[in-house]
């Protein structure tokens, strides 16, 4: 969480790269909430090990995006999620 251009995405990128447990994982970066839902379905079917990257998390917090069922699927699949959010959206959510 932070202001625009504060370095959130860069810091998250370095954190994922430095985490040895995630070395063999692919990065899955959907563009929209519906893309996230489809991506989670693909991960469930293929068992691909990945980190879900949600840059600007507020874009995914919609009824057709990251809702409770999708989040439960990510937990069940043991899929890590990396997300960033601008500070101005934090209080809203």
Image (spheres, rainbow, N blue to C red):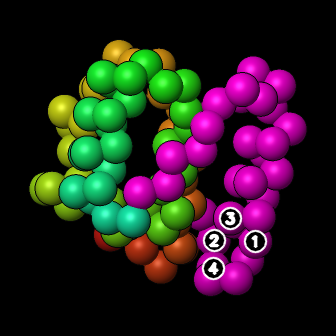
- Regarding residue 48, the answer to whether it shows in the image is yes
Residues under labels 4 and 1: Cα distance?
Answer: 9 Å
Tag 2 or tag 1, which sits nearer the N-term? 2
Q: Residues within 10 Å of mark 3 (few under 14, many from 20)?
A: many
Q: Residues within 10 Å of mark 2 (few under 14, many from 20)?
A: some
Residues under labels 2 and 4: Cα distance?
Answer: 4 Å
| Residue bearing mark 1 | 7
Under tag 1, what secondary structure? loop
Residues under labels 3 and 4: Cα distance?
Answer: 11 Å
Under tag 3, what secondary structure? helix
Residue 19 figure quarter: top right
| Residue bearing mark 3 | 9
Q: Position of residue 77 (x, y in %)?
A: 40, 19
Q: Residues within 10 Å of mark 4 (few under 14, many from 20)?
A: few
Residue 33 against residue 46 in the figure, above or below: below
Tag 2 or tag 3, which sits nearer the N-term? 2
Looking at the image, is mark 1 or mark 2 nearer the viewer? 1
The dot on residue 27 is none
The dot on residue 3 is 4
Q: Which residues are magenta?
A: 1-30
Question: In the image, what residue occupies the spot 55% across and 33% down?
Answer: 50
Under tag 2, what secondary structure? loop
């Amino acid at each position: 969480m932070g202001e625009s251009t504060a370095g959130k995405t860069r810091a998250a990128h370095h954190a994922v790269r430095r985490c040895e447990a995630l070395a063999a994982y692919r990065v899955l970066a959907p563009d929209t909430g519906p893309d996230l839902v489809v991506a989670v379905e693909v991960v469930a079917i293929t068992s691909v090990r990945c980190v879900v990257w949600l840059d600007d998390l507020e874009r995914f917090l919609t009824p057709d995006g990251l809702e409770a069922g999708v989040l439960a699927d990510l937990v069940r699949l043991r899929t890590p999620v990396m997300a960033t959010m601008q500070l101005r959206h934090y209080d809203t959510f």
